[in-house]
């Protein structure tokens, strides 16, 4: 079992790295600055990112300054365990159960019996789960005649490093899964809680012998071939089969008469996997709660930044047309200043002035390189927390309302106002060196630790999700400075994947899973209406019979899955209640069918 304090260090690194454009996609420039001396200095907002993360993002009770040590956890009942998984579930195997290295890897998962009543078997302290369930002295978990037993699975993804907090109180599955488990337990039911880490993230990397170059890294191009959503779902299916058989003594294929029902939960990419687990393995997964999940993958996801523009003008969250106009005009002025000169020389001192205003690493010389200018302008010269907007955050400039207040109250020009905001968000220099970024992400040794290379691989081989800022779009930043070619260059230079192949990969993913046309049932989709990822999620326009969806008005990216706070607001509370009601109704209907009453 991992020491939580060691896991905390990894989470700190992750939190500093993750920024607003990362969650399912990869925003290039947020990585640019993890480059000097092995530390992270994100492109726009290192100070804000110290207290926020992006994928399973802000508002976590487990932050940089308040990480609970193991002995102080409210519930020290969570076990960190591993399961053997095939490295390639789809290859031919000479032996059906060949899990020997290098054909397998250890995948981490977490388990808690906190919401299982005392008459059921519990996992003792410091005991190996696998030995228990296979030992001759192990009693199988049994149900009481007066209760029902369920299994809830928090699906892992590319987000922050998992630790025991995932089943205690974190941004992953707290507000929906863990709280619902508690409520069902109070009603006399049993809920076994699990969390499964995604392959090639956290500590669930395969271990390879040295190759012909003496590399052991699992994230070389050749070894990344085993990383995909399809392999991850096969991991999930094997995990559920394993638990059903060894812990609950059920039929390996899911006995219809068995009372145990599995429900998967996840937000963003894990929310996509939760939905796809029900789609691909309906005999194992009875229902799924799919939060802020972009099930329709897309190569050129320019709508992301267009939604950011909409958020900046949205008065419900403190935005305004004036705020949006300042952001747009400031970037237009920067484009004018930087595009009217030859990249081989500086005209009118524009580059020196801008480099000084925005505290750019390397000064004006950095702005003499066209690709660096694209990096600077294409994703915005300031940080806009659109997908992780928290109306109740306490920090300075931590949400759209506070950012817009600063911009609209300023007497500076739009460009000067953006510079002032950028410096207020972070006084560290902004690293915009494109080649340094390419070198970093192309190196398996440099970019493995925080999952950056793993996720970029998935965008190139499956997802796309590239948040462009095209010339004729409604993007509020430097229009035309983040074309799709920028992202496709990464795929080719870091992984050797050509542009046309990336497009085919994205198309293949939608064809395989269905995208918005997914044909399944018992999937509940929940979206925040200010979340840019909601554009690609299932909604009332795309959902089908048996797959309802709801909007959480004013909510950002799966905000309702975070720690429950007293000031969350009525809309977030209502969203959670609708999730509880849907899952409870689904499970009660299943219980009634099993009892032969319908």
Image: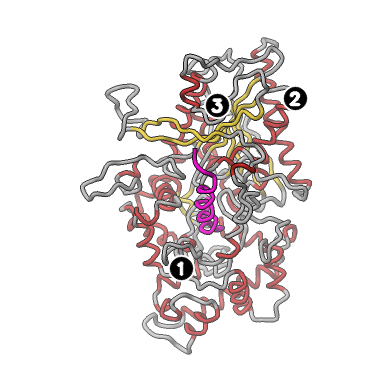
Q: Position of residue 289 (x, y in %)?
A: 61, 35
Magenta residues, start to end: 1-23
Q: Which residue is mark 1?
A: 375
Which numbered tag is attached to residue 285?
3
Q: Considering only order in the chain, which callout, 2 or 1, is on the residue closer to the N terminus?
A: 2
- Which residue position holds label 2? 187
Q: Is residue 517 magenta?
A: no
Residue 477: x and y in percent read 55, 68
Mark 3 or 1, nearer chain start: 3
Magenta segment includes 2:
yes
Q: Secondary structure at mark 2?
A: loop
Colouring of the image: secondary structure
Counting from the top left corner in percent of width and height, residue 64 is at: 59, 55
Q: Could you tell me what secondary structure mostly forms the magenta stretch?
A: helix
Residue 407 or 338: which is nearer the viewer? 407
C-alpha span from label 2 to label 3: 23 Å
């Amino acid at each position: 079992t991992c020491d939580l304090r060691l896991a905390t260090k990894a989470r700190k690194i992750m939190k500093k790295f993750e920024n607003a454009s990362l969650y399912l996609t990869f925003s290039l420039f947020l990585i640019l600055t993890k480059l000097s001396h092995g530390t992270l200095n994100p492109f726009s907002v290192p100070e804000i990112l110290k207290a926020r993360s992006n994928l399973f993002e802000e508002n976590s009770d487990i932050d940089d300054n308040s990480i609970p040590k193991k002995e102080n956890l409210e519930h020290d009942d969570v076990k960190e365990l591993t399961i053997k998984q095939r490295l390639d579930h789809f290859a031919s195997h000479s032996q059906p159960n060949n899990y020997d290295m290098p054909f397998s890897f250890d995948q981490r998962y977490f388990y808690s019996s906190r919401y299982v009543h005392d008459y059921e078997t519990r996992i003792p302290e410091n005991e190996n789960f696998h030995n228990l369930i296979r030992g001759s002295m192990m009693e199988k978990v049994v149900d009481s005649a007066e209760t029902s037993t369920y299994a809830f699975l928090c699906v892992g993804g590319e987000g922050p490093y998992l630790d025991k907090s995932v089943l205690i109180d974190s941004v992953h599955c707290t507000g929906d899964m863990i709280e619902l488990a508690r409520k069902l337990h109070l009603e006399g039911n049993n809920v076994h809680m699990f969390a499964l880490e995604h392959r090639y993230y956290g500590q669930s990397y395969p271990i390879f012998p040295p190759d012909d170059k003496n590399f052991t890294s699992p994230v070389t191009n050749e070894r990344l071939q085993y990383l995909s959503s399809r392999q991850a779902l096969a991991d999930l299916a094997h995990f559920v089969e394993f638990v059903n058989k060894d812990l609950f003594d059920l039929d390996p294929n899911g006995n219809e008469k068995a009372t145990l029902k599995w429900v998967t939960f996840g937000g963003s990419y894990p929310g996509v996997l939760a939905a796809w687990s029900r789609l691909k393995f309906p005999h194992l997964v009875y229902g799924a709660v799919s939060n802020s999940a972009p099930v329709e993958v897309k190569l050129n996801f320019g709508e992301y930044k267009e939604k950011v523009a909409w958020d900046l003008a949205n008065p419900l969250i403190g935005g305004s047309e004036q705020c949006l106009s300042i952001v747009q005009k400031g970037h237009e002025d920067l484009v004018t200043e930087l595009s009217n000169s030859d990249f081989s020389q500086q005209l009118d001192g524009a580059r020196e002035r801008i480099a000084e205003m925005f505290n750019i690493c390397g000064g004006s010389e950095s702005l003499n390189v066209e690709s660096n200018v694209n990096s600077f302008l294409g994703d915005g010269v300031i940080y806009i927390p659109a997908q992780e907007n928290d109306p109740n955050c306490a920090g300075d400039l931590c949400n759209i309302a506070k950012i817009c207040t600063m911009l609209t109250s300023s007497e500076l020009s739009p460009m000067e106002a953006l510079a002032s905001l950028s410096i207020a968000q972070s006084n560290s220099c902004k690293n915009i060196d494109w080649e340094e970024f390419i070198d970093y992400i192309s190196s398996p040794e440099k970019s493995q630790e925080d999952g950056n290379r793993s996720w970029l691989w998935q965008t190139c081989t499956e997802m796309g999700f590239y948040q462009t800022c095209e010339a004729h779009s409604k993007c509020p930043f430097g229009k035309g400075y983040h074309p799709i070619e920028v992202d496709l260059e990464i795929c080719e230079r870091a992984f050797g994947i050509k542009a046309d192949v990336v497009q085919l990969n994205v198309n293949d993913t939608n064809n395989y899973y269905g995208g918005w046309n997914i044909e399944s049932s018992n999937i509940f989709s929940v979206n925040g209406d200010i979340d840019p990822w909601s554009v690609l999620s299932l909604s009332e326009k795309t959902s089908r019979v048996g797959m309802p969806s709801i909007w959480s008005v004013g909510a950002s990216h799966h905000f309702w899955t975070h720690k429950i706070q007293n000031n969350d607001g009525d809309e977030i509370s209502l969203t959670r209640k609708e999730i509880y009601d849907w899952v409870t109704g689904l499970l009660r209907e299943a219980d009634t069918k099993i009892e032969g009453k319908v």
